[in-house]
């Protein structure tokens, strides 16, 4: 999302939904959004934050779902063991996600 759109969102919206990005990029974007929300005098807690993620449980799932985009979207795709996936979901929560959309 461009900086201009991030600046407008705090005035007009009550939610933000990030697409297929890793927890670090999500945390950065939430930080930018929070700064803009505070600048316009709104409570950052009033904006719900969601992340869309993919799921690739088996070898080859990522490529089958995303084709040539697989490498690009990998940071935003849950994969590995169940424990690794649960840990990754926790990383999104720590980064500020209120919702995780699969």
Image (cartoon, grey):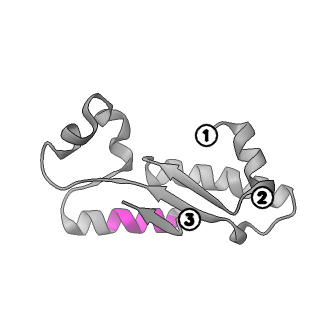
- Horizontally, residue 1 falls left or right of residue 67, namely right
- Residue at mark 1 to residue at mark 2: CA–CA distance: 16 Å
- Residue at 73% x, 66% y: name it: 44
When the figure is inspected, residue 56 is found, relative to residue 5, above or below; the finding is: below
- Residue at 87% x, 63% y: name it: 41
Q: Secondary structure at mark 3?
A: loop
- Residue at 42% x, 47% y: name it: 20
- Residue at 69% x, 53% y: name it: 33
- Residue at mark 2 to residue at mark 3: CA–CA distance: 15 Å
How many C-alpha atoms fall within 10 Å of the one at disc 1: few (<14), some, or many (≥20)? few
Confirm whether the magenta stretch covers residue 91: yes
Q: Position of residue 26 (x, y in %)?
A: 53, 52
- For disc 2, the marked residue is 37
Q: Residue furthest top?
A: 68
Q: Quadrant of the N terminus?
A: top right
**Residue 2 sits in quarter:** top right
Q: What stretch of residues is rendered in magenta?
A: 87-94
**Cβ–Cβ below 8 Å for labels 3 and 1?**
no
Tell me the mark number nearer the camera, choosing from 3 and 1: 1
Q: Position of residue 13 (x, y in %)?
A: 72, 58
The secondary structure that most of the magenta stretch takes on is helix
Going from N to C along the chain, the mark reached first, 2 or 3, is: 2
Q: Secondary structure at mark 1?
A: loop
- For disc 3, the marked residue is 96
- For disc 1, the marked residue is 1
**Residue 35 sits in quarter:** bottom right
- Horizontally, residue 48 falls left or right of residue 72, namely right
How many C-alpha atoms fall within 10 Å of the one at disc 2: few (<14), some, or many (≥20)? many
Q: Position of residue 18 (x, y in %)?
A: 52, 51
Going from N to C along the chain, the mark reached first, 3 or 1, is: 1
């Amino acid at each position: 999302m461009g900086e201009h759109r991030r600046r407008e969102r705090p005035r007009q919206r009550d939610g933000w939904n990030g697409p297929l990005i890793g927890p670090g990029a999500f945390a950065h974007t939430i930080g930018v959004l929070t700064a803009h929300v505070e600048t316009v005098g709104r409570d950052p807690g009033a904006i719900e934050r969601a992340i869309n993620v993919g799921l690739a449980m088996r070898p080859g799932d990522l490529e089958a779902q995303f084709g040539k985009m697989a490498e690009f979207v990998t940071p935003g795709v849950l994969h590995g063991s169940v424990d690794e996936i649960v840990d990754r979901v926790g990383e999104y929560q720590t980064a500020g996600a209120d919702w995780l959309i699969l």
